[in-house]
Image (tube, helix red, strand yellow):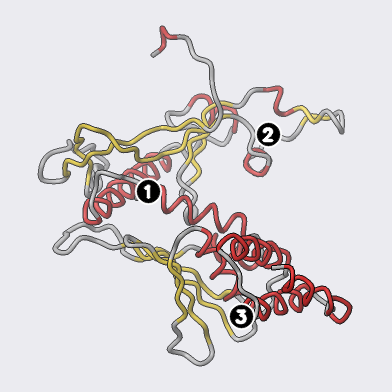
């Protein structure tokens, strides 16, 4: 290990960029004259990852290396496969879904798609492929922290230990249909233009639809004191952009949680074409060891009499 470090130090004067430093470390690790034990390799790998996160992604190779590093750190598979010479396709995959990222020769992100697996023989109308412009946007900005949040959000959908891959895919279908129905219900309160009324007086509050891997959220309470800007000694404008950008108020996230007992989860919409509610039956739902949950983003004290 010390010999390797001495070799890196001897060339430090000639290194002009983080990319050069990363290259020298990789070449040193590949030199068989320096025997590294498991701990040494882990330390050097952590150093390389730190260097990688500090390098701006401005090329196809840079994007490929950064995505590969991210996938490895999250325990996911990474693959490069391109059929068009003018574009490059990168894939980050699990057993239940994969994310496809398409970029051009200049390193510009063209499109990102999320591919979910539907069980064989499924008659569900849930789409297998969903476009994710929000993921493309954060990759274009070099915001890999948010990219990781998107991937974590997708992995959380399938985090059902007692389910096989088929049931996990059905759980995704159920969550998709719930979000779809909530979006339909939210459209019925679109006539409310007053933000205070929308958050506190409507049935769903302010609805934030799923964005890539970021799950759907319902903003249901906004304390007045959060609109106070103490530094500028002013009151923030009460509009949707301010509330969303500053993440003001309290939100509940629509999620799936595992359970010991099975629950009927819908495999299709529970709102008819005429707007009527449909009952959950064995024909439009399936029992799974999971249930829908409203997860609070912040702790909220409640009276036990209200529960």
Secondary structure beneath dot 3 equals helix
Report the residue that reaches farthest toward the right.
13
Secondary structure beneath dot 1 equals helix
Label 1: how many residues lie within 10 Å, few (<14), some (14-19) or many (20+)? some
Q: Which residue is mark 2?
A: 238
- The residue that appears at 22% across and 49% down in the rendered structure is 267
Pick the front one: 217 or 159:
159
Report the residue that reaches farthest toward the bottom.
85
Query: Residue 103, how many percent across, how many down?
Result: 55, 78
Q: Which residue is mark 3?
A: 30
Q: Report the quarter where the N terminus lies.
A: bottom right
Secondary structure beneath dot 2 equals loop
Q: Nearer the viewer, mark 1 or mark 2?
A: 1
Q: Which residue is mark 1?
A: 157
Query: Residue 297, how many percent across, how many down?
Result: 53, 33
Query: Residue 199, how many percent across, how many down?
Result: 54, 30
Label 2: how many residues lie within 10 Å, few (<14), some (14-19) or many (20+)? some
Pick the front one: 14 or 177:
14
Q: Earlier in the sequence, mark 1 or mark 3?
A: 3
Report the residue that reaches farthest toward the top.
305
- The residue that appears at 74% across and 76% down in the rendered structure is 19
């Amino acid at each position: 290990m010390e010999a390797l470090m001495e070799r890196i130090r001897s060339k430090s004067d000639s290194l002009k960029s983080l990319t050069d430093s990363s290259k020298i470390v990789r070449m040193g690790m590949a030199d068989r004259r320096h025997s590294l034990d498991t701990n040494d390799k882990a330390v050097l790998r952590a150093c390389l990852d730190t260097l990688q996160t500090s390098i701006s992604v401005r090329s196809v190779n840079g994007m490929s290396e950064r995505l590969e590093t991210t996938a490895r750190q999250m325990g996911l598979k990474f693959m490069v496969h391109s059929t068009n010479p003018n574009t490059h396709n990168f894939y980050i995959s699990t057993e239940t879904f994969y994310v496809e990222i398409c970029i051009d020769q200049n390193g510009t992100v063209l499109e990102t798609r999320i591919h979910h697996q539907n069980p064989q023989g499924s008659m569900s109308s849930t789409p297998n492929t969903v476009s994710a412009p929000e993921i493309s946007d954060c990759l274009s900005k070099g915001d890999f922290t948010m990219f990781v949040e998107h991937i974590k959000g997708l992995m959380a959908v399938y985090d059902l230990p007692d389910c096989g891959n088929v049931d996990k895919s059905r759980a995704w279908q159920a969550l998709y249909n719930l979000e779809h129905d909530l979006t339909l219900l939210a459209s019925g309160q679109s006539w409310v233009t007053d933000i205070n009324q929308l958050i506190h007086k409507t049935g769903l509050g302010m609805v934030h639809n799923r964005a890539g891997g970021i799950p759907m959220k319902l903003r249901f309470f906004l304390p007045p004191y959060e609109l106070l800007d103490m530094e500028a000694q002013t009151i923030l404008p009460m509009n949707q952009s301010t509330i969303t950008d500053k993440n003001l108020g309290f939100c509940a996230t629509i999620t799936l949680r595992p359970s010991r007992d099975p629950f009927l989860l819908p495999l299709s919409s529970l709102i008819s074409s005429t707007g009527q509610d449909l009952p959950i039956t064995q024909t439009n739902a399936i029992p799974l060891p999971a249930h829908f949950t409203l997860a609070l983003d912040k702790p909220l004290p409640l009276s036990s009499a209200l529960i």
